[in-house]
Amino acid sequence: MGMRVSGSNSVELNDVFIPTEGIAACRPRGDFHAVYCVVLSVALPLIMSVYMDAAERAAALANERCADNKDPVTPYLLDEMATTLTTALVMTDHMVRLVDDLRFEADIATVSKLIKRKTVVVQACSLTCNKAAEATGRSRLHARRRH
């Protein structure tokens, strides 16, 4: 239960019975099941939208906070940030196009394309946030809390 590296492996279920008819899919341990071709194809673009939201917000905060910055290096950092954000956006959009409003081919080739693009999106979003923090002279970039 849970996603790898999410820390959700700490969930423990005791005294739970699941009847056979309640099990949607069975597979031998370690084997790749074809159901993942559907699950990953649908889930990955959705998950990447969360990464995109964080990166877009970091970029907006950096642009806002650096608007009056006179440091000659800042425009270069903001351009690097914008470039990595564009990379993430293009790859995320391409992931959505690959899924084609759920008319995708549920196979290993599609999943492979999506996972490669997911890797690029994650790296680009991370770099976008890092550049946003660097441009503002902060080790971390937080939105101001609104009450």
Image (cartoon, rainbow, N blue to C red):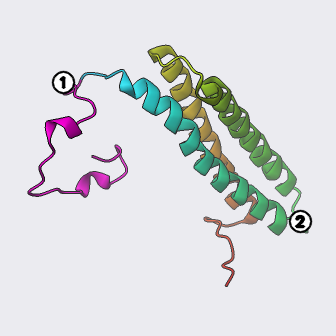
Image position, residue 22 (x, y; %):
22, 40
Query: What residue is drawn where x is 37% and y is 26%?
Result: 35
Task: Name the one closer to the observer, 39 or 18.
Answer: 18
Choose between 34 and 51: the one closer to the eye: 34
Residues shaded magenta: 1-30
Given residues 140 and 87, the one toward you in this image is: 87
- Residue marked by disc 1: 28
Label 1 CA crowd tier, 10 Å (few <14, some 14–19, many 20+): few
- The residue under the point 64% across, 30% down is 101
Which image quadrant: the C terminus?
bottom right
Q: Main secondary structure of the magenta part?
A: loop
- Residue at figure coordinates x 88%, y 66% from the top left: 69
Identify the residue under disc 2. 67
Residue 37 bears which disc, if any?
none
Q: Nearer the viewer, residue 91 or 36?
A: 36
Would residue 129 appear left or right of 119 to someone viewing this image? right
In the image, 103: left or right of 137?
A: left
Look at label 2 and name its amino acid. Ala
